[in-house]
Amino acid sequence: MEHHKFRFIKGREYAFFHEDVHLLMIDFERDEKKEIYRIDDQEADGTYILEYPGELYIEQIKEIITSIFFVQVSEEHREGRYALGAYFTCQRKEYALFYDRENLENAELIFFRAVATGTGDYELSNITDEDEYREVVEHIQERYGHIFS
């Protein structure tokens, strides 16, 4: 069977990790619809091989990421718009790693601690403890360094 490439005209694709699972979210912003697939493999030409992970899994992932998938961060010269690159646990705490969604050439990543509010949403907070910050950076490099470099 011949492989085909697809692109959604009205949807934007965002690859991200939930722990060690590589996922792809397709955001149909106009219709407020988001589809999630597991990235099973990637071919040499860059084509992703996608797997439908099942409705229950998708709903569980959406519960975690919906409130934090897209964030805006005030920076010195602009209002940065970021997308989730990874959601992970380190030392029994949850974190979210983000990449610049408007300028993919910008290799700068930002991350925050993610804390459940009890209402189904998550709050993001800066990491002020230097030891915790260093541990998270090392964790990111070990776990996702092959992707975010």
Image (cartoon, rainbow, N blue to C red):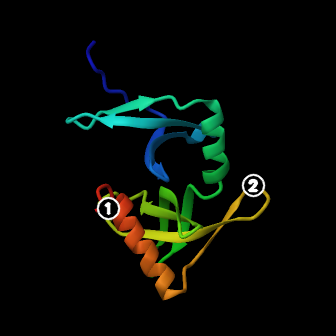
Q: Quadrant of residue 122?
A: bottom right
Q: In the picture shown, does residue 68 fall above or below 128?
A: above
Q: Residue furthest front?
A: 91
Q: Quadrant of the N terminus?
A: top left
- Disc 1 target residue: 145
Q: Can residue 77 be seen from the camera position used here?
A: no
Give SS at disc 1: loop
Q: Quadrant of residue 3?
A: top left
How packed mark 2 is, by other alpha carbons closer than 10 Å (few <14, some 14-19, many 20 or more), is: few
Q: In the picture shown, does residue 132 fall above or below 19?
A: below
Task: Kindly identify the amino acid type of the residue bearing the numbered disc 2.
Answer: Gly
The numbered mark at residue 120 is: 2
Q: Residue furthest left?
A: 44
Task: Kindly identify the amino acid type of the residue bearing the numbered disc 1.
Answer: Gly
Q: Residue at x 49, y 53 (%)?
A: 19
How packed mark 1 is, by other alpha carbons closer than 10 Å (few <14, some 14-19, many 20 or more), is: few
Q: Residue at x 65, y 34 (%)?
A: 56
List x then y, in percent, for residue 117.
75, 64
Mark 1 in CB contact with mark 2 (< 8 angstroms) = no
Q: In the picture shown, does residue 58 fall above or below 95?
A: above
List x then y, in percent, for residue 80.
47, 68
